[in-house]
Image (cartoon, coloured by chain):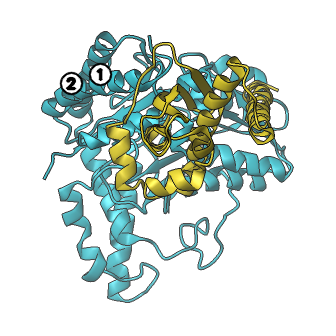
Chain colours: A cyan, B yellow
Amino acid sequence: MRKRIYLDYAATTPVDPAVLVAMRPYFNRDFGNPSSLHSFGQKAKSALEGSRNVIAGLIGAKSEEIIFTSSATESNNLALKGVAFANRDKGNHIIISAIEHDCVLNTALWLSKQGFEITQIPVGKDGLVDPERIEKSIKKDTILVSVIWGNNEIGTLQPIVEIGRICRKKNVLFHTDAAQAFGKIPIDVVRDNVDLLTASSHKIYGPKGAAFLFVKRGILLTPILHGGGQERNLRSSTENIGSIVGFAIAAEIADERMNSENKKLLMMRDKIINKILRKVPDSYLNGHPTKRISNIANLRFAFVEGESMIMELSAAGIAVSTGSACSSPKLEPSHVLLALGLRPEEIHGSVRISLGRWTTDKEIDYLIEVLPRVVEKLRKISPFAR
Amino acid sequence: MYSEDVIKHFRNPHNMGKIKKPDGIGKVGNIICGDVMWLYIKVGKSASRRKKDEEVIIDVKFETFGCTAAIATSSMITDLAKGKTFEEALKINKQEITESLGGLPPIKVHCSVLASDALVEAIYDYLAKNKRPISKELEERHVHIKREKEIIEERYKEWVGKQEEVVGEK
């Protein structure tokens, strides 16, 4: 078989073998429903609470502040809609950044149709939110600020601690979507002034179908799912125990290896950026050069289109992704790259390379060898290349 | 997602590049939308006995900025157009291009329209430059393609305005 190189870890990650082993018994041996009083149920219940303790401990939270959900999308929906509807009497203004993930952006757009007022804070050319602009946008009726911690497309890390401090000072709730950041940077919800935080399992070598929302004690949320009252009545549904157990193990492993993995990935990431930018004329880095997650590089190549780059790279066995309109179901360019002030034609040539636990130097060298050739080939077809 | 033939044409496109001193050029698409096709044609007398002395497209080349489907349809239209009379070439439509490629994902069918538009524009360019008669139908197609282009550019202007509004602070 032809070699396949996965460099799309920001999209999803394979499950770590140790995680798979740890979660497997909960699909058939310890399969009970945590709400059942018998021994099957109690076994599952204790695994569920054990997982909750582990995750809470990793971010400086209390166990009861962790609500398990099915996905980061669900957590973000619960955070925004939950706060919005529970605080309607206090105000109806919500602030988000211009580079939120679609699930925050579209939830906010939906809320605006329900009568809430949404302000989107622009970012600089480097993809960073200026906390001062958030402070200036907070009004008397502002109930929530939500800013993505690590951006999924360009990898920029936002000044979350500062934004949190401002929100605390102004007495406004602060939520952050940490789907890309959790497990990759140290997080302490108390130190970092975070009221609500979203994280997901499948971005950190856990299974799909598990995520959590940290909700600081005392914050009222209106649930989205009504039913049997699981998860402190905030998220009814029989708990996805196997995936939750896997998530907790994956989070523990990510925490243990955070420093060593970051060191390795950062070196690889910067090697890719430096070598490619040097080898390919008219190529650029999207997003801040250093304030970024260790595993994401987003590069832009003039005169060529991203979808065709993806296909050429895929033919060479390399899996990456693009923000080009041609690759999206809506045929619209990425709103994140637009927010950086890039023109649609510049966005078409953007490629996201994201590294992970099993990325090797050999794979990186292969990418550095193949990518410039792909760009060169497509530029030969392009009418714009010189 | 893509058929084998699409991938084949995309990876090894036929008739790629410029024609020096072309007899006609068709420039269609819009870089803002992500697809731009430039089609060059060379016109001459047919060498085949059947079309003896008839004017045919003796050479055709393309340059394309765009996705896999845009490049594959460009390559396919050059194959389909070569050796054809104008009358024959103008009959090449999106169905023929799409079918010749073993199908396109629904969302990419517009790329095949772009390819046939590029050929129409190249032929129109040749006829107009040489002050040759242009059929009513061709004139209409040319006007339609130009108008579509203008609409997209107009929509883009509005769209960029809208983006700034959404992204900007209120």
* Structural crowding at the residue carrying mark 1, measured as other residues with C-alpha within 10 Å and reported as few (<14), some (14–19) or many (≥20): some
Does residue A338 sit above or below B138 in this rendering?
Answer: above
Give percent across and percent down for residue A346: 54, 22
Q: Which numbered tag is attached to residue A372? A: 1
Percent from the top left, x then y, of residue A281?
Answer: 37, 10
Residue A247, by quadrant, is bottom left
Judging by the rendered image, the residue that carries numbered circle 2 is A369
- Could you tell me which chain the residue with mark 2 belongs to? A
Q: Amino acid at mark 1?
A: Pro
Disc 2 from disc 1: Cα separation: 7 Å
Return the residue nearer the eye: B25 or A135.
B25
Where is B94 relative to A296, above or below?
below
Left or right of B144 on screen, residue A314: left
Vertical arrangement, residue B23 with respect to residue B72, above or below: above
Image quadrant in which you'd find residue A46: bottom left
Task: Tell me if A371 is positioned left or right of A119 in this view.
Answer: left
